[in-house]
Amino acid sequence: MLISGAGVAGPTLAYWLARHGFAVTVVERGAGPRSSGNPVDVRGPAWSVANRMGIVPRLRAVATHATAMRLVDGNGRSLARIPMPATRGDEVELPRGDLAAVLLDAVRDDAELVWDDTITALAHDAGGVDVTFERAAPRRFDFVVGADGLHSTTRRLAFGPESEFVSHLGLYVATVPLGSDEGTDVLLHNTPGRLVSIHPARGAALAAFIFRSAPVPGFDHRNQTQHKQIVTMAYADAGWRVPELLDRLAAAEDLYFDAVSAVRLASWSAGRIALLGDAASCVSLFGDGSTLAMAGAETLAAALAADPATGFARYEAAHRRLVDPKRRRVGRAAGMLVPRTHLGLRVRDLAARGVAAFR
Ligand SMILES: Cc1cc2nc3c(=O)[nH]c(=O)nc-3n(C[C@H](O)[C@H](O)[C@H](O)COP(=O)(O)OP(=O)(O)OC[C@H]3O[C@@H](n4cnc5c(N)ncnc54)[C@H](O)[C@@H]3O)c2cc1C
């Protein structure tokens, strides 16, 4: 069994497949595990997956410990402060890279890990999949699972070009590591159509710029110089700590920037090749993607263990029931986080004060 991608979904799937007795190889384009990254949540179905993997203490040890969300105006004055549910006992928020590292550690002894490589061609027949790699020698596997994220190579090779499955949701997101603590409150500053946030994490706080924009002509998700220009132009006249954060962005070497996107496919498998996590069903940054990635991985492993011949179909039928409701909430979540107008902002701030009063 070959898994492409060692983010959240890939190592979780590798762990459960190994537990079910499969021989597993994971190929990852990165040169090694990364720490930090955007904060993600492990909760609901993923919390019980983590519990059964025995990794909850390790997840808690690297949790961000953000305790509340605070809306601030252009002068930094507090407009509303909402305690965050992540302070409950059955969920945790942590940097995505740290989650991936903990998941990888759980499977390190039971799977073959191949770093700094990528699949370049896939050819499947009734008995298996012939896989060509950029660096390693070609190999044949029983099954291949693409857990290689929003811009999945597996999906492109086995299902078709990205443009057929990935849709821009009218927003872009940039994140910049600040390398500081920044307290315990997530700070959010909005102007119509724009949000800047500072998300605390033990010594690894992250600034995020999320803004509404039609697709930028010629957008290239790998061109950092272009990304810095786009963000700087979008926030040119913004107040609060934005000028300081734009300076950090200009100097950053590890900027993340991408269109906020959804992935939709009519089917998540083609013969002996399947997709998992963001590659199959990215619900954007508003939709519990890491939780869905972990839950889907366990479902897929169990379905393959029960019957390899029908495993992909049963995984898809079961996991779509979790994914679809999250998808429907994305528009509302985006409207709350990045209101388009002054009126929308005032309504959102009022609603936030109401929520704060009841927590
Ligand atoms: C800014 C931002 C904020 C977010 N906030 C949240 C949040 O608050 N809560 C939440 O639950 N989710 C959040 N998400 C979503 C969450 O990060 C994803 O849904 C989750 O990481 C999906 O896991 P995955 O394993 O499918 O993909 P990824 O985590 O993207 O992992 C894919 C892996 O595949 C590797 N890869 C890519 N191409 C190849 C290739 N060709 N060959 C081999 N390997 C490859 C990548 O290097 C990566 O390691 C956020 C996302 C972003 C961008």
Image: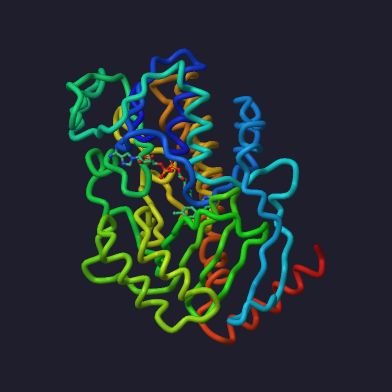
Q: Position of residue 149 (x, y in %)?
A: 37, 44
| Quarter assignment of residue 187 | bottom right
Residue drawn where x is 75% and y is 42% of the image:
89
Nearer to the camera, 57 or 284: 57
Q: Residue furthest top?
A: 21
Nearer to the camera, 41 or 208: 208
Q: Reply above or below: 107 against 278.
A: above
Horizontal side, residue 348 vs residue 205: left or right: right
Nearer to the camera, 335 or 179: 179
Q: Reply above or below: 254 against 14.
A: below
Residue drawn where x is 51% and y is 81% of the image:
239
Q: Position of residue 319 (x, y in %)?
A: 51, 39
Q: Position of residue 340 (x, y in %)?
A: 50, 79
Horizontal side, residue 275 vs residue 72: left or right: left
Specify whether residue 318 is in view.
Answer: no
Colour mapping used in the image: rainbow
Q: Position of residue 106 (x, y in %)?
A: 52, 24
Q: Reply above or below: 172 against 305.
A: below
Horizontal side, residue 338 vs residue 1: left or right: right
Q: Residue furthest bottom?
A: 343
